Amino acid sequence: MVGTMVLVLMGCGVAVSLGCNPISNIPAVVGTAFAFGLAVVAMAYTIGGISGCHINPAISLGCFLSGRMSGKDCAMYIIFQIIGAFIGSALLALLTANVSELEGTGANDLQAGVSIAGGLLAEIIFTCVFVLVVLGATAKTNGATNNFAGLAIGLSLVLVHLVCIRYTGTSVNPARSIAPAIFQGGTALANLWIFIVGHKIDHITE
């Protein structure tokens, strides 16, 4: 819960604060990508020993499907990841409400010129890549490289964001999409299903 709260507050917070726009503000795109990645790295070495740093329902589902955790644990993780995302979004909404120049909560949405099919495809592809990195980097067969799993996962999230922000704002994390969309409303909420269905399809294809 705490880990997902930090991810949403920091990652979405930077997107809002820098005015992330994949067409007209490329420096903000880079900053946002690094914010999400650094948040994962920070949390990996902070709460990794407690929860494995599961701050993403897609990761928890991947661990369940690969036999690394029980169905009960997976369900509880996902519930508290979403709760954490709502806390992070609520804090961000509170902050932006007191700054007239800032709007929104960094919610995912289809970007200019991107179709529904394009958005779904982007989320499926990049969620697959991200989950693959997480499962591979944390595999026991990787030996000593497990010590650097947090860094590998965080940097891969930076890479995924640098590519995918132009299409969907980059989710690869249902909790990160659900809470900001509900706070922000509008098309972000109307298109929320893309970021939920896309991740489910990803696990089916895996």
Image (cartoon, rainbow, N blue to C red):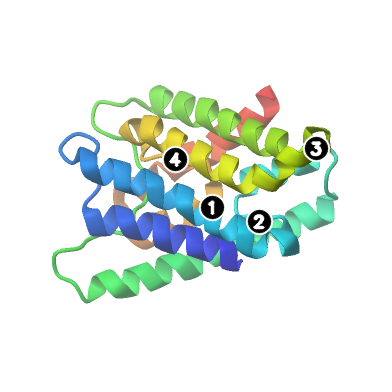
Between residue 196 and residue 7, name the one nearer to us: 7
Foreground: disc 3 or disc 4: 3
- For badge 4, the amino acid type reads Val
The residue carrying mark 3 is: 143
Between residue 15 and residue 103, name the one nearer to us: 15
Q: Provide residue 25's location: percent of width, then percent of height.
A: 18, 41
Question: What is the CA distance from the residue labelled 1 to the residue labelled 2?
Answer: 8 Å
The residue carrying mark 2 is: 53
Task: Decide: is 99 above or below 107.
Answer: below
Whether residues under marks 4 and 2 lie with C-beta atoms below 8 angstroms apart, the answer is no
What residue appears at the point 59 percent right and 29 percent down from the top-left corner?
Answer: 128
- For badge 1, the amino acid type reads Val
Whether residues under marks 1 and 2 lie with C-beta atoms below 8 angstroms apart, the answer is yes
Q: Provide residue 179's location: percent of width, then percent of height.
A: 46, 59
The residue carrying mark 1 is: 40
Looking at marks 1 and 2 on the same chain, the residue that comes earlier in the sequence is marked by 1
Question: What is the CA distance from the residue labelled 3 to the residue labelled 2?
Answer: 19 Å
Task: Find residue 80 and report its image quarter.
Answer: bottom right
Q: Provide residue 138's location: percent of width, then percent of height.
A: 73, 41
Foreground: disc 3 or disc 2: 3
The residue carrying mark 4 is: 158
